[in-house]
Amino acid sequence: MAIKYTRHFLDKLENLFASSEYILRYEKGSFKSGYCILKDTKIVIVNKYFPLEGKINALVDILGELQFNPQDFKEKSVQDFLKELQQTQLKF
């Protein structure tokens, strides 16, 4: 699966985070990479001023860092989406 820079693809990424134990928030800030992860409180914060492409790239980077396991998700569609992402050239 190739990364698609569309609103629909962003919605799928947001749904994946909503199904996880992490809370995804869009906030203003001067993060160098566009996001920060607060692992103790399980919050992911993405710069809300990033364009669509930047938000998608940040969320994909975060997915690689967090190492989600598809079996940890209840919804089959979320599991399948995560498996497809993990099989891309990104190699999380």
Image (cartoon, grey):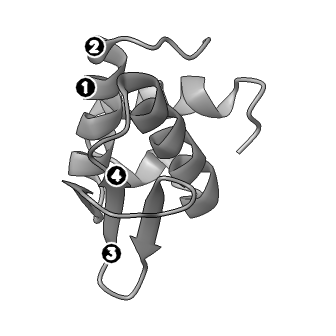
- Does 62 sit left or right of 38 as displayed? right
Q: Which numbered disc, 4 or 1, marks the residue closer to the eye?
A: 4
| Residue 49 x/y as whole percent | 29, 42
Residue beneath label 4, please? 47
- Does 3 sit left or right of 87 as displayed? left
Cβ–Cβ under 8 Å for marks 2 and 1: yes
Cβ–Cβ under 8 Å for marks 4 and 3: no
- Tell me which amino acid carries mark 2: His
Residue beneath label 3, please? 42
Q: In front here: 90 or 55?
A: 55
Task: Please report the residue visible at 46 percent of the width from the left and 24 percent of the height from the top.
Answer: 53
**Dot 4 or dot 1, earlier in sequence:** 1
Residue beneath label 1, please? 11
How many residues crowd mark 1 within 10 Å: few (<14), some (14–19), many (20+)?
few
When the figure is inspected, residue 59 is found, relative to residue 28, above or below; the finding is above
Task: Please report the residue visible at 53 percent of the width from the left and 35 percent of the height from the top.
Answer: 57
- Tell me which amino acid carries mark 3: Lys
Image quadrant assignment for residue 81? top left
